[in-house]
Image (spheres, helix red, strand yellow):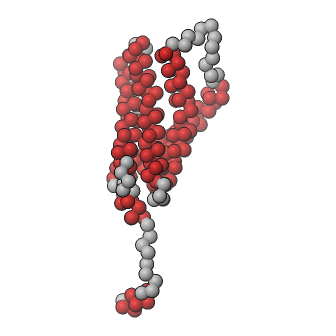
Amino acid sequence: MPLMQKLLRNLFGYAAIISAGVFATMLPVLVRAPFPHATARFHAEPYGLLLIFMRELIMFTPPFVAIVNAMAWITLRKGSQSARPWAIAASISFLVLSVPFLVADVVILQYQLTGFVEFAGVLVLFLALSSFGIAGVAAFAKRDAMSVFGSSCQPVASDTKNLGTLASAA
């Protein structure tokens, strides 16, 4: 297995643990958080609706990211046939997870909500998550990407008919 695929396999495992932890800590907030609804103070502006959608995406993405990344890590570790699709799905989950950070940066710039340090922090998160996603898709995109990995983990079929002659020759 090439080095990039090994690094991404480890990244999938760590991302599964971190996403599960994030979801576990967010669970009380999810239970108590009301869904935004129409009130006298609610204005359906495009940025407001986009921020509501991004809020919901941020809150409900961690369990899916945890499951997909855990499955990618497990299948890559076992060398199963479904490892490549799970790895691509996990890489795409990083791309989906990076979208709210891009939207947050656009909104921060549009409304000048914070200073440069906060803007840069959100931008770094966006760039890191999207680069992990792009690297994963690039590493596992080829159909033969798993052939090196699959050939090293598959047991070698032995010829049982000539087993006795091989043993007696030694």
Residue 140: x and y in percent read 38, 49
Query: Which residue is at the far top?
Result: 40
Is residue 2 at all visible to an observer of this figure?
yes
Query: In this rendering, would 25 be left or right of 85?
Result: right
Report whether 44 appears left or right of 97.
right
Q: In the rendered image, which quarter is residue 134 located in? A: top left
Residue at (62% x, 22% y) in the render = 35
Could you say where residue 36 lies in the image, as x and y percent from the top left?
61, 19
Q: Is residue 117 left or right of residue 160?
A: left
Q: Quadrant of residue 44?
A: top right
Residue at the front extreme, as displayed: 143
Q: Quadrant location of the N terminus?
A: bottom left
* Position of 4 relative to 49 (above/below): below
Task: Name the residue located 56 percent from the left edge and 32 percent from the top edge.
Answer: 60
Does residue 167 appear in this view? no
Where residue 18 sits: x, y (%)? Answer: 50, 40
Q: Quadrant of the C terminus?
A: bottom left
Which residue is located at x 49 percent, y 45 percent?
A: 69
Residue at image location 53% in from the left, 36% down from the top: 62
Q: Position of residue 61 (x, y in %)?
A: 53, 34
